[in-house]
Amino acid sequence: MMHNEKYQLNDGSSLPKIGLGTVNIQGAIGVNNMLTAVEENGYRLIDTSTNYNNEGAVGEVIRRSSVPREELIISSKLPGAAHDYDKAIGMIQESLYRIGIDYFDKYLIHWPLPKQDKYVQAWQALIDAQKFGLIKTIGVSNFLAEHLERIIDETGVTPATNQIERHPYFNNKALVETNKKYGIVTEAWSPFGREINDVLENETIKEIAEKYGKSPAQVIIRWNLQNDVLIIPKSSSAERQKENLEVYDFELTDEDLSAIDALDKGEPGRVEDQHPNEYEEYV
Ligand SMILES: NC(=O)c1ccc[n+]([C@@H]2O[C@H](COP(=O)([O-])OP(=O)(O)OC[C@H]3O[C@@H](n4cnc5c(N)ncnc54)[C@H](OP(=O)(O)O)[C@@H]3O)[C@@H](O)[C@H]2O)c1
């Protein structure tokens, strides 16, 4: 199936180009939403986090799904309260117990939290957890150029992916380029602006969508794919989950791509003003 196209990673493994975001997908309803994504729509990559309070539901999906565990790609994230090396190792194991699996396909440091200044030891914990066989692919999230440079310098290990905020009003282009320079695959979070902004109603995007007979969401996904960016749109609706995968029957022109790039608003375009050097979550 076309939507099983993959990105090659710098650690030799690969990931589907589109995964399922799971913010606010939780409990019994959440299990049903995710089962629909996996069973009916063919999603394989599930992006969860300890902070989404849904690792239990993800585990239930794995147990109930007819798709074999080895075909699913389960990705979670280290919370800020667990950046100390020992706490990080314990948290990774705890998170695996919560989901009921014995390895993660991918695991990220959720935020760098530079004011706490423990992300290097957190990164060392992910490196060691990978050696112990607890994680296949290790990466980071919300890391800026200086954070990437520091962990690479101090540990010698480059993350495989960096999951960052990216949508047409905040396209994070310089950081996408930095990731590329290091051979890191960019993952875009809140690709539709989480419905906090009106990017799905934007006139430029609507016009491009009409031209191809596609939806604004599909145009935004294409814009990411044509920039070599992995995306994890969240949808709890079977129809929209399907729509978000039906993006391989059209191609944006360079002109379309530039028109979408031009919608960038810089820092004020962030959905919730979460600058990685300022945003703090120590839960
Ligand atoms: N690393 C980080 O710090 C971080 C931060 C934020 C998010 N994330 C990850 O990124 C994922 C995606 O981001 P997000 O959940 O914030 O927001 P998003 O994917 O930008 O937007 C989700 C919203 O868009 C709607 N939607 C989905 N598909 C649609 C379509 N085809 N047409 C119209 N509306 C559509 C969804 O509604 P329905 O559900 O009703 O379809 C939902 O309200 C998260 O779920 C999470 O896994 C990571």
Image (cartoon, rainbow, N blue to C red):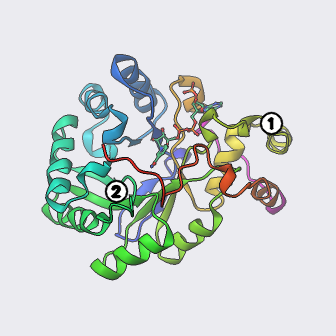
Q: Residue at x 34, y 21 (%)?
A: 27
Query: Number of marks in the image?
Result: 2
In the rendered image, the residue lying farthest to the top is 28
Label 2 CB sits under 8 Å from any ligand 1 atom: no
Question: Would residue 232 be found to the left or right of residue 204 on screen?
Answer: left
Residue 248 on the magenta segment: yes
Q: Which mark is residue 249?
A: none
Residue 188 in the image: x percent, y percent? 54, 52
Residue 248 visible, this angle: no
Residue 272 in the image: x percent, y percent? 57, 43
Q: Quadrant of residue 157?
A: bottom left
Q: Residue at x 54, y 40 (%)?
A: 233
Residue 30 on the magenta segment: no
Residue 206 in the image: x percent, y percent? 82, 38
Q: Which mark is residue 213?
A: 1
Q: Which residue type carries mark 1?
A: Gly
Question: Would residue 279 be found to the left or right of residue 87 on screen?
Answer: right
Label 1 CB sits under 8 Å from any ligand 1 atom: no
Residue 216 visible, this angle: yes
Count residues near mark 1 (Cα–Cα under 10 Å), then give few for <14, some for 14-19, many for 20+: few
Residue 170 in the image: x percent, y percent? 66, 53
In this rendering, is residue 46 above or below 111?
above
| Residue ID for mark 2 | 109
Give the magenta range. Answer: 244-255
Q: Secondary structure at mark 1?
A: loop
Q: Main secondary structure of the magenta part?
A: loop
Q: Measure the C-alpha gap from mark 1 to mark 2.
A: 39 Å
Q: Which residue type carries mark 2?
A: Ile
Mark 1 or 2: the one toward you: 2
